[in-house]
Amino acid sequence: MAVGVRPQWTEKLYRPSGGQDHLGLGSVSSDRILPKLAPGINVLTVHPRYWSLYTFVLDEFWRRDLPRTRRAFVEFYRPCEAIYAVGAQLCDQPEHERYGRLRGVVGAQKASPYAAQNREEFDPQFGYMESDLGGYGLYYATTIAAMGLIAPALPGTTLSFDAPTPEGRVVAAGFRSAVADTVYYREYFANLTRPVPAGVVRDYIRRACLCQLQTDTAPDRELLRDVFLHAGPEDAPTIRRATLRFLLDLADQTNGTSLDEDAFRQLIYFRAHPDGATYHSRRGIQRTARRWRLYQAREYYSYALNRLWAYLCAWGLDASVGGSRPVPLTDLWDHAEAALDFAQLVDSFDIDDPGFQATTPIVEVAAWASEVANVAGTLDDRWDIQAPLQEHALYRWSRGTSQGPATIPGMVTLLLLVVARLGAPATAADHAMDWDLVTEGGHARLAMSRFFVQERRQSMAGATIGQLLRVLYSDYVIRQHQQVAVTKLPEDTYRFRREGDQLRFFQQHAEAVMNSSRFEALATTIYELGFVEGLGNDTHALSDAGQQLLDDGDLPDRPLSEALALQEQP
């Protein structure tokens, strides 16, 4: 299958957001770690059928006698997507209703109220979104190119505009066959300058909707299965198949339990859910399951640091009377060390107060945390999710509004638990092939491995928990925030600035959240490709194709390759 390259004219897939990722930890997950786990599937490219739709529209553009320019494509493309966005709001098929509200529809924010007006006809020229290339330019083009379905018009090529590859034309033909006999395609699609009757839009979307890909009658489903299982550069298809198979294994073993992102995080990390569902990776999937566990460890680690940062911002605004005066660092150290009283934290978890304070050695606190969390087992074993205090429980607890200074010992405990699970040098040696996820980010983006080494050295030197906290705030929070904010200039994203031995705080929103795990995109992909029922349902049985992919690691049919071979025959 042809290997695509990144179309340089499209807008960035992950547009910079000045108000997010203040420690630079989120970009490590979204731009470096998750692409190693789920290449071609991300939070912005949720629905596989958009691969068909956009390739189809591009192919239709090239089949017509039109100027091969960006402007000409925009004029041709936007009415097509506008009507599709409206249609997705009008779809009345049973598969659509299973979704409730179908998320991830491009242009839905404006198309939804427009469609709700119960109009007799819809204007294909209505402004469904500001970007002139809509979802194609904002989200999908880069991924579709990487899957080998389009050839982007790059400098040095003979293309004046993006064009479908031979593989792309086959996928486009699959979508075309789904809608070829609709009135919309026969009478309106070629010249979308006049309003389209509502009945025509409804008839079209019954064949074309995103939800219809997971039906047995969708002619492009088998083609897209082939794309998702086998397309892309280098080892991307192998990795993607492994993750899809891992998701199917997880779905199969948790059939009877509704899954969402929160449940997903607990299952991939602890291999268990508080409601009783458990997961044990089958043979051939262990490494993929292990790498997803390491990913979630990074999320707990990143969240703890971001939560310490957010607490500092809130405390600083209070201490500086809304930012009206700088706060001496000595005030922060005094407050932080006083906060290392674990009484309020353990009371929240109904655990006996260990009596720790800032002068308690790190090793004592680490040993206590390991005991109450029942830390035991290897990187491939199930971990105790029912322990009185563990990583996800701390994460949930910290999201409340009344923790106050107890946030500090809570997040330090969370960090020490991640170290207890993964930080031993022997663990790194035993799993060297997977340790790239732990070292990802390096020094500049606070790799977990950096903290493991630093914590181990401090513990061996007899350092106290107060000394560890000062390192965390000095190097991992204050200095890191300064460095990240500098890289975003001239946009001002500072929540505080260091001025000598003082901090000056600014009245701006400061929140700590986990990054998306891509669970919704992954779950939608395997559902819409017809491998499994919706994971949000209590029951989500695998289809025959899903079971075969799980059992064999691949599907034997290669319809895309077969179609290309037929085209090449004389």
Image (cartoon, helix red, strand yellow):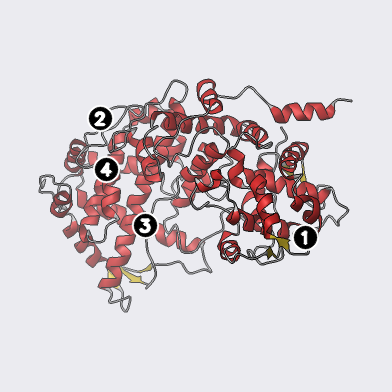
Disc 3/disc 4 C-alpha distance (Å): 19 Å
**Mark 3 or mark 4, which has the lower sequence index?**
4
Q: Earlier in the sequence, mark 4 or mark 2?
A: 2
Residue 192 as seen in the image, left or right of residue 336: right
Do the residues bearing badges 1 and 3 touch, measured as CB atoms within 8 Å? Answer: no
- Residue ID for mark 1: 192
Question: Circle 2 is placed at which residue position?
Answer: 376
| Foreground tag (3 vs 4) | 3
**Element class at badge 1:** loop
Mark 4, residue position: 416
Instruction: Confirm whether residue 381 shows in the render.
Output: yes
Q: Amino acid at mark 1?
A: Leu
The answer to whether 91 is drawn above or below residue 237 in the figure is below
Q: Mark 3 highlights which residue?
A: 512
Counting from the top left corner in percent of width and height, residue 31 is at 52, 47
Could you say where residue 356 lies in the image, as x and y percent from the top left? Answer: 13, 49
